[in-house]
Image (cartoon, rainbow, N blue to C red):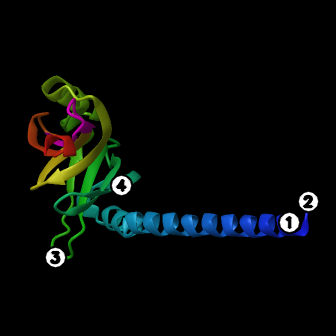
Amino acid sequence: MGKKTIITLIVSVVVLIGVIILFTNIYQTARNQYEEGHQKSKEFVLSNKDLDVKSIDTIETYNGEKKYHVMSGKNAKNEKIYVWVPQEEKNNKPTIKKQSEGITEKEAIAEVNSEKNPEKIVAVTLGMDEGIPIWEVKYIDKSDRYNFDYVNFNNGDIIKHMAIKNEKDS
């Protein structure tokens, strides 16, 4: 190998390492923004004795019309629960439901499959819409459009449907 080849190789490796560090940093920043406030919400829920929450197992951020931290955990009776904590400063009164009071993620998917017959389920997220606990089911339909169905957590009804128009539909 000539001197130019070695220098080119070294420069390429340094650039590659720099790109990897840059993308790792961008990913970490995005992830930190997603998880921002999770610990604060968890402490708020666990320290508020009126809420009767004993433990929190998971916390996810839901971004709908309003932002929520959605938690799964257990109450003092050791029953599995979900907790929705709104992230607006003026009203952050949590909503708490026993998991057994509503439908499961699988039941929400089954309802969407039955009603809409999607091509592919993309994601299912527990969220809140206009004060109603929901399962947000994202999917691709037969026309290759991206769809959102809001399935009522309490009774399994699809309460809202949105589709993003595909360029082919224009």
Sequence order check, earlier mark of 4 and 3 = 4
User: Mark 3 or 1 closer to N-term?
Assistant: 1
Which residue is more in the foreground, 35 or 122? 122
List the residue tagged with mark 1: 6
- Circle 3 sits in a helix, a strand or a loop, which is it? loop
Residue located farthest toward the top when viewing the structure as drawn = 114
**Residue receiving disc 3:** 90
Residue type (three-letter) at the residue carrying disc 2: Met
Q: Is residue 144 magenta?
A: yes
Q: Are marks 3 and 2 in contact (CB under 8 Å)?
A: no
Cα gap from disc 3 to disc 2, whole angstroms: 67 Å
Mark toward the viewer: 3 or 2: 2
- Vertical relation: 133 (above or below) 29: above
What secondary structure is marked by label 2? Answer: loop
Q: Earlier in the sequence, mark 2 or mark 4?
A: 2
Report the magenta stretch's main SS: strand
Residue 107, percent from left and from top:
23, 29
Q: Which residue is mark 2?
A: 1
Q: Which residues are drawn in magenta?
A: 139-151
Which residue position holds label 4? Answer: 60
Name above or below for residue 154 compared with residue 9: above
* Front residue (pair 50, 156): 156
Which residue is painted at 18% across and 30% down in the image? 112
Q: Position of residue 118 (x, y in %)?
A: 23, 29
The disc, 2 or 1, on the residue closer to the chain's N-terminal end is 2
Q: Nearer the viewer, mark 4 or mark 3?
A: 4
Q: Are marks 2 and 1 in contact (CB under 8 Å)?
A: yes
Within 10 Å of disc 3 (Cα), the crowding (few <14, some 14-19, many 20+) is few
Residue at position x 39%, y 63% in the image: 34
Report crowding for label 1: few under 14, some 14 to 19, many 20 or more residues within 10 A (C-alpha): few
Q: CA distance from mark 4 to mark 3?
A: 21 Å
